[in-house]
Image (cartoon, rainbow, N blue to C red):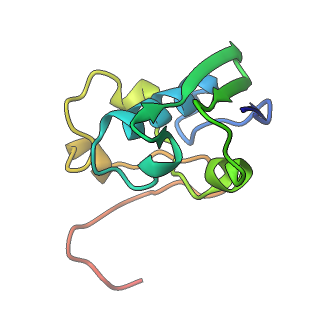
Amino acid sequence: MTVTVYLRWGVLWSDGVPFTADDVIFTFEHIIKAKYANGRDGFVIGGMPVILTKRDDYIVEIRYPVLIPNVIELVSAEHFIMPKHIYQGDATLDNNPKNANPVGTGPYKLAEYRAGNTSG
């Protein structure tokens, strides 16, 4: 009933801040609280939310309220982890002005964004 997720050490957000368990827990807690969040059914089972525990900066434990046969599928489903240091304390994340300057962990960093520009 418990899944332990080990994060890769040394991963940074594109603004240089370390990617940690705090970001994962922040994101999953947001999904649990948001009634219509994409992927919420993987974190709230029969009206009961999972219990998220930070074991250290790179280990997150997810405890399910009941035995789930496809738990690995639920945990590994595509979830875009949000940087806690950017969004913490914001009332809304969907239409947040901070979304115009995205921060990610991939190999690219957005240099410029112009609304309405569809050319490469």
Quarter occupied by residue 3: top right
13 to the left or right of 29? right
Q: Residue at x 53, y 27 (%)?
A: 25
Examine the rendering and report whether any part of residue 95 can be seen. Answer: yes
Residue 48 on image: x %, y %:
44, 32
Q: Nearer the viewer, residue 7 or 118?
A: 7
**Left or right: 50 as drawn, with respect to 30:** right
Question: In this view, which residue lies farthest toward the bottom?
Answer: 119
* Residue at x 38% of width, y 30% of height: 86
Residue 14 falls left or right of residue 34: right
Q: Residue 43, position in %: x, y?
A: 50, 40
Whole-percent x, y for residue 102 in the image = 40, 49
Q: Quadrant of the N terminus?
A: top right
Which of the two residues, 107 or 35, is positioned nearer the viewer here? 35
Q: Write down the quadrant of residue 38 in the picture.
A: bottom left
The residue located at (62%, 18%) in the rendering is: 53
Image quarter where the C terminus lies is bottom left
> Which of these two is toward me, 59 or 116?
59
Tell me, yes or no, if residue 83 can be seen here. Answer: no
